Image (tube, helix red, strand yellow):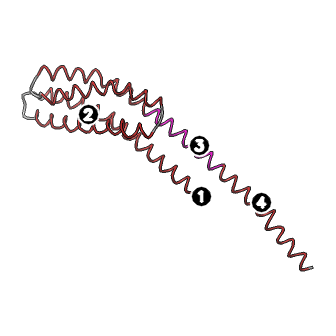
Amino acid sequence: MYQIIFHFDIKRQSYDAEIINKAGKQRMYSQKLTKHAFFANNAKNTDSFEDQMLDFRETYQDFKIGNYYINNIVLKFYNNQNLNNLYKENQLYYKNLENASSAILNDIHNDSVLVKSIKTIRDNENRFLVSMDKIVEEYQKNSEIKVSKLQQMQLLFHAAAFVLLLYVLFFIIIPIFGRETKSID
């Protein structure tokens, strides 16, 4: 029975690791978004501008998908007020990054939009990264608490199994051997 419980708990820990990985990817996507925006700005009026904008668009899509996953799937699985508060703060920076990126993509040849949006991306990226670090730390803390509880539960199951073994030994096996020896006499 306890094997089933441990199996499900290990699955849950695997899910925690996946979530921490997704949150880490969001950090990476925000950094890539900033990098591609700067590269695109530097590549204006060159042949590589379209390629830079394609990279920017792909990163932006990945960034949006990751945000959707975390906010619509992960937060429903974790009923944690502290995480919800951290995500609310994070979404302020995410929205600024999303709006600026969207503005660039909607009018890629407008230099003033590009410059203004790059400034917005630059101003919000670090705050987004810091807020994502806090979120990852919270997930890590929750995961460590779960591992500690699993270890305590495992210790409890081992103790119960040991007590059961002693019970079987002293109240079943020894009395059976005691009767056999008396019946042989």
Instruction: Report how far apart the C-alphas of labels 4 and 2 lie in the structure.
Output: 62 Å
The residue closer to the viewer here, 118 or 11, is: 11
| Residue for badge 4 | 167
Query: Residue drawn at (43%, 30%), measured in percent from left and top?
Result: 84
State yes or no: discs 1 and 2 in contact (Cβ < 8 Å).
no
Residue 18 locus on image (x, y percent): 40, 44
Q: Which type of secondary structure does the marked residue at label 2 adopt?
A: helix
Pointer 4 or 1: first along the chain: 1
Pointer 4 or 2: first along the chain: 2
State yes or no: discs 4 and 2 in contact (Cβ < 8 Å).
no
Q: Looking at numbered disc 1 in the image, what kind of residue is underneath it?
A: Met
| Residue for badge 1 | 1
Q: Looking at numbered disc 4 in the image, what kind of residue is underneath it?
A: Tyr
Q: Looking at numbered disc 2 in the image, what kind of residue is underneath it?
A: Lys
Q: Mark 3 packing: few (<14 Cα in 10 Å), some, or many (20+)?
A: few
Q: Which residue is outermost to the right?
A: 185
Instruction: Report how far apart the C-alphas of labels 4 and 1 lie in the structure.
Output: 19 Å
Instruction: Report how far apart the C-alphas of labels 3 and 1 lie in the structure.
Output: 17 Å
Q: Which type of secondary structure does the marked residue at label 4 adopt?
A: helix
